[in-house]
Amino acid sequence: MTESGAIPIAGRAAECPFDPVPELYEAQKDEELRRVTVPSPMLGEFDAVVLARYDDVKSVLADGGLHMGGSMPYQAGNLLSYDGPEHTRLRRMLTGSFTARRARELKPQIEGAVEAALDAVEKAGPGADLVQLFCAPIPTQVICELLGVPYSDREEFQRRTQVALDFDISREEQMRQAAEMEAYMAELVAQHREAPGDNVLGRVVRDFGDQLTDTELAGIGNMLLIAGHETIASTLSAAIALLLRHPDQLAVVRDDPSATEGAVEELLRICAPATILPRQAAGNICVRDREIEEGERVVASVLAANRDLGSHDENLDRLDVRRPPQRHLTFGFGPHQCLGQQLARVELRVALPALFNRFPTLGLTVPHEELDYRTNALVFGVDSLPVTW
Ligand code: HEM
């Protein structure tokens, strides 16, 4: 095992926040596995084996010998808090609600959410912050549909969600908002117990309600809210920022509907909001034929794995929305692979072309270098996108 210094937790290069730091490319070439010190604002400094090759990351995510490893506080009902049979049992209760067909069925509601957000941008401008008015409200509206949040509660729900996810708001205020959201979720669960609606939470209550406590149901609601909101808002913000840097690529997304699916996969590959996936070895395990000891932390770099050349010699740092499909691990792999990936794809495929068609002259009001990229956070994105048209 090679010991080497610290790598910033997200491993993003200072010159271009979309690219990995050179150390991750070096780690990709190493025959030995690298152990690094990871300075994490959330978990404190810790030592971990860093994996940067596509095949290593994939095999570790598929391996039942690694668990989620206390990388976040335990929360009843949150799939990311469970491993093994407990995880499988809970996940099975939700998979039927997240098929590709279900995601397609939600398309009219997604189109409605996108049109409403575009109207709000148009009304506010010319000149608006797209994160506030476009990237954040769309996934919130979609989550409201999924959870069966009544229309009368949506404004308040959206306000709370935005506060809970706003990095500029103090920790105390965020905790207060999170507690309010939990209380709201408990109330929503009580309503669905009374009269299960035709939505994800309603279906889980109807089909599995007798196997789940109210706390677990509220936890499922909170997990879907966080997992389905921040990731999409962040991907949208990063993808828009990246496309504004590359007008030729933006023009393809705007003008060629046949390119949309491929373009969204390419943007997902490059923007990958969940930059690293942390794990811990539940017993001694092997990656290639190197041993990782029980209890050791492992950091799987999705950012690096998505640019692993393998046997190819293409430049995978470059955005090319017409590129033939490339493998990527943006939605993870194995037992915890993203449950909402089909839904995420539909949201991105609807939102991005619609934005550039409504505002064909869209441009930033600040230089690209001045955008507030969240380079060191666990979820990569941009905090605000001041634009005009
Ligand atoms: C671009 C958008 C999204 C990205 C990049 C993303 C990425 C991911 C990744 C990487 C994981 C695996 C985490 C790990 O293995 O440690 C994950 C899990 C998960 N995602 Fe997503 N996600 C997105 C959108 C969504 C949406 C829209 C939903 C639902 C509404 C969702 C629900 C979940 C859930 C429930 C899990 C946990 C699955 C499990 O542990 O079994 N995600 N996501």
Image (cartoon, rainbow, N blue to C red):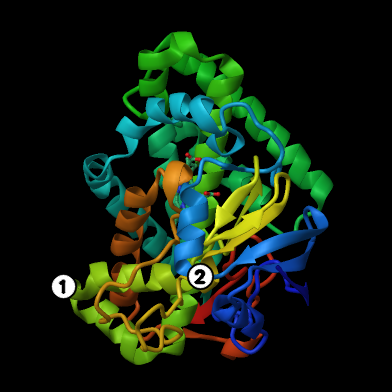
Residue 35 percent coordinates (x, y)? 72, 66
Q: Distance between the residues labelled 1 and 2?
A: 31 Å
- Give the residue at mark 1: 258
Q: Residue 53 carries which label?
A: 2
Q: Which of marks 1 and 2 is nearer the N terminus?
A: 2
Nearer to us: label 1 or label 2: 2
Q: Judge from the rendering whether residue 13 lies leftward or rightward of residue 264; answer left or right.
A: right
Residue 267 percent coordinates (x, y)? 39, 72
Residue 150 percent coordinates (x, y)? 44, 30
Q: Judge from the rendering whether residue 387 lies leftward or rightward of residue 256; answer left or right.
A: right
Work out whether 97 lies above or below 338: above
Residue 218 percent coordinates (x, y)? 57, 25
Q: Which of 265 and 171 is in front in this view?
A: 265
Q: Which residue is drawn at 65% across and 41% down?
A: 283
Disc 2 residue type (three-letter): Arg
Q: Which residue is drawn at 65% across and 73% down?
A: 11
Q: Residue at x 52, y 46 (%)?
A: 227
